[in-house]
Image (cartoon, rainbow, N blue to C red):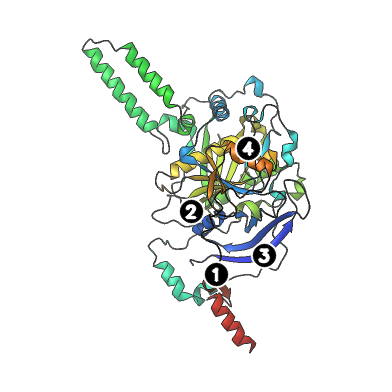
Amino acid sequence: MKFTINQYFSKQNSRCGYCKGTKCSISHGMHSYTMFPEDYQELIDRGWRRSGLYCYKPLNNETCCPCYTIKCDALEFKLNKSHKKILKRMTRFLRDGKKDKNEETDRTGDFSKDAVGSCVDIDEDDCGGGTDKQSASVGGINDEPREPKLPIPNINFDVIAAANQERHEEAQRSPEHFDDQVPTEVENPVIATETECASKSSCDGSNQQRKKAKTIRLERRQAKLAAKGIEVSNCETSASKKQKVSQGKTLADYFADASANDKHKLQLKLVHVEGQEFKDTLKNSYALYQKYQTVVHKDPPTKITDYLEFLQESPLKYTKPRSGPQDGYGSFHQQYWLDDKLIAVGVIDILPHCVSSVYFFYDPDYSFLSLGTYGSLREIDLVQQLAKKVPALKYYYMGFYIHSCPKMRYKGRLEPSYLLCPEAYTWHLLTDETRRKLDESKYQRLNSNTDAQDVENFQTSDLSKVMLLYDNAYLTYHRYIQVRFLYVF
């Protein structure tokens, strides 16, 4: 059934997870029964965000802590010094199984967290040194806007499909449509394995194949010259090394820095939230989540009951069009397996133009690896892989950027990043000038062109296009009014 069904709740006032104020976080909200990925893509490009089945949009000009949708262009992403340090730390740990001497201390509290749950560790190079134990109190699942306790009627999708047979059949004939399905498992899941990438001749999503071919050509050329008694020029070798250094290592290069002799093997598995593999590992992921919430967020074990509600339940319908990624669109868990142990999980949505980060949790015993930041880098790498088949899918959405909450500014360190203007709904590069403006006033239009308007601005005439679900049938708002008028009289 190719329809998106939402129940709108209008304006909501709730507790703020950033300033901890009561009834000062103001947003629109709605319960989503089912939603196609392309529809959710349009929503997040309008400032919406989901938490389980609940979708909300902060009213930035009214709420206490304005939330600006932020995205990073993954294809133009630049590694900074701190990122490289974290990647090298992981490589050394996998190779030797040892911690650096200066990393023996507990780093559990050394992270920041946003209201949609994407956890990113704050490295000393990024935050000026030291840790901040108070950062654990920022955001988290329990601080997200909650769905109001209003009646949610049950909907029978089969009955709706039967009542709208003509529309349903038309959707079935769409060239982009695949039969409705619940994946038993993700076919050919995106698996990034540290050891395997290094031992194979190529690894999907990296430059290893291209580099190795270049190395082979160079070795062949050197062998031919040696056979002729010609000594290879030292300056040529030196120039080759300089060229390699100047190019710099990419994310994929760092992830491929492993060998079959490494002490540990890190494997990433992408599993759909409705797939069998997710169900098979549910016990592992839930236990990890409980440990994370208890140790990092100090939640009492008796209150950790929202795992399925917020991290498995999703309105996004699994779709797999021919022009899309091989794993399809929808909600997934990217699992991090160290040998045979699950140490981290990234909850993500794969959409037509982006990978959207929903939540990230990890084993606090491995906090010395800065798994929050490492997870973000891995998700950017996933975008880079997916973009090879789907060029439009090139962005990494990080939820909200809240400049008025200093602990939440870390997202701007993933460059280049863009903020969504809350009025014109245009994207703007996050620069130092933008930060200065937000320092002066926490609410900003962002688009400096006062003539720029929202191209999708609502008009009264648009009411005729609005579709409503009434008595299991889809009606335009205009038709709904007619039906209600006839019913009353």
Expressed as whole percent of the image width and height from the top left, the position of residue 58 reads: 66, 54
Q: Residue furthest bottom?
A: 489
CA distance separating discs 1 and 3: 24 Å
Callout 2: SS: loop
Q: Is residue 287 left or right of residue 224?
A: right
CA distance separating discs 4 and 2: 28 Å
In the rendered structure, which disc, 4 or 2, sits on the residue that comes first in sequence?
A: 2
For residue 257, the mark is none
Amino acid at the residue labelled 3 = Ser
The residue mark sitting in front, 4 or 2, is 4
Amino acid at the residue labelled 4 = Tyr
For residue 10, the mark is 3
CA distance separating discs 3 and 4: 31 Å
Asked if the residue under mark 3 is in contact with the one under mark 2, i.e. CB atoms within 8 Å, the reply is no
The residue mark sitting in front, 1 or 3, is 3
In the rendered structure, which disc, 2 or 3, sits on the residue that comes first in sequence?
A: 3
Residue carrying label 2: 329
Does residue 311 appear anywhere in the picture?
yes
Based on the displayed image, in which of its 4 quarters is residue 424 positioned? bottom right
Q: Residue furthest left?
A: 228
Q: In the picture shown, does residue 291 fall above or below 45?
A: above
CA distance separating discs 2 and 3: 28 Å
Residue 313 or residue 243, whichever sits in front: 243
Amino acid at the residue labelled 2 = Tyr
